[in-house]
Amino acid sequence: MASKLQGSKIAFVGGGNMAAAIIGGLLAKDISPKNIFVSEPWDVNREKMKGLGVNTTTSNTEATETADIVILAVKPQVAKSVCQELGGGWGQRKSTPMIVSIAAGITLKSLQEWSKLSDGRTPHVVRVMPNTPALVGEGASGLFAGDDVSSDEKELVTALLGSVSKAIEWVDKEELLDVVTGLSGSGPAYFFAMVEHLVSSATSLGLSTEQATRLATQTCLGAGKMLVESSDEPAQLRKNVTSPNGTTDAALKSFEASGFKEIVDKAVKAATSRAEEMGKTLGGS
């Protein structure tokens, strides 16, 4: 997949953690640092990027003017001004630019309107909802493309995200990105919270914090690996470790009595709803 990116000029507007993760993934796939450009106003972040061997600048226009793919990796609150700056500076481009936005909540329509070129052309836009495990090459990403994005462009974006994501899912309705946000975008925090509470419970019963943390974190990692590598459904994996009237059965019955299914359902729906609200608030023209 990464071979599709060979020779492509890739520009990042913003040099934060997610940009750094993707760049690290690209370099690991033997994408030349000479073809990667980063615009970043903060000296510290820019120096980190320069240390990777990629091209750096403080100018968004300079970084993106010849890029085949422009990754918008800025905070949602500044996305409008950045897009307007980019669109205004792309008047001399012969090719229509493609923007890959990881700015949470900013709608496709807003991104297209804000970044419209002075000659009236509208950039091709793909919205992406990645998650923080991308920082260790184990990300999960949901993607949505505008109608004008070609199949070749989709393949390029798939290759781009494939450098840091093990699961890449294209959705056919933009609103489903809010569901992706509630599931995998916010999802790592759910597991962190679960491990946090497992450790707390075990330490209250006598284990040291260090022992409980090692056991709980490895249990989470092992269970995750089984979910990825096994052909069994999650429900079957659960049944496989649940003996009737055994210890696991007792714990799961306690979960059920506390309304565990409803708790998880409410959490995912709450995150999804908040993503929708943010889109309406931040995505206005």
Image (cartoon, rainbow, N blue to C red):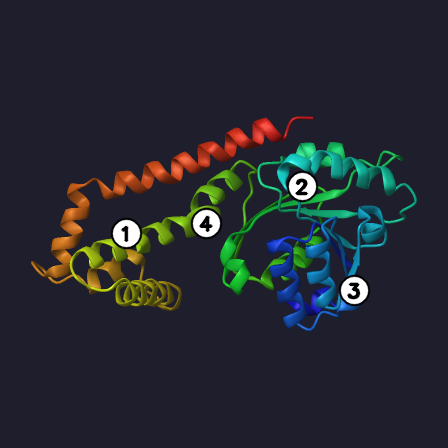
Q: Write the residue at 22% across / 58% down.
A: 203
Which residue is situated farthest in the right direction here?
A: 92
Relative image position of residue 241 (x, y in whole percent): 20, 64
Q: Secondary structure at mark 3?
A: helix
| C-alpha span from label 1 to label 3 | 45 Å
Question: What residue did someone put label 4 on?
Answer: 184
In the image shown, does 280 or 147 lie closer to the viewer? 280
Which badge, 3 or 2, comes first in the chain's sequence? Answer: 3
Query: Residue flagged by tag 1: what amino acid is it?
Result: His
Number of the front mark, 3 or 2? 3
Question: What residue did someone put label 2 on?
Answer: 146
In the image shown, does 3 or 63 lie closer to the viewer? 63
Question: What residue did someone put label 3 on?
Answer: 35
Q: Secondary structure at mark 2?
A: loop
Number of the front mark, 2 or 4? 4
Query: Residue flagged by tag 3: what amino acid is it?
Result: Asn
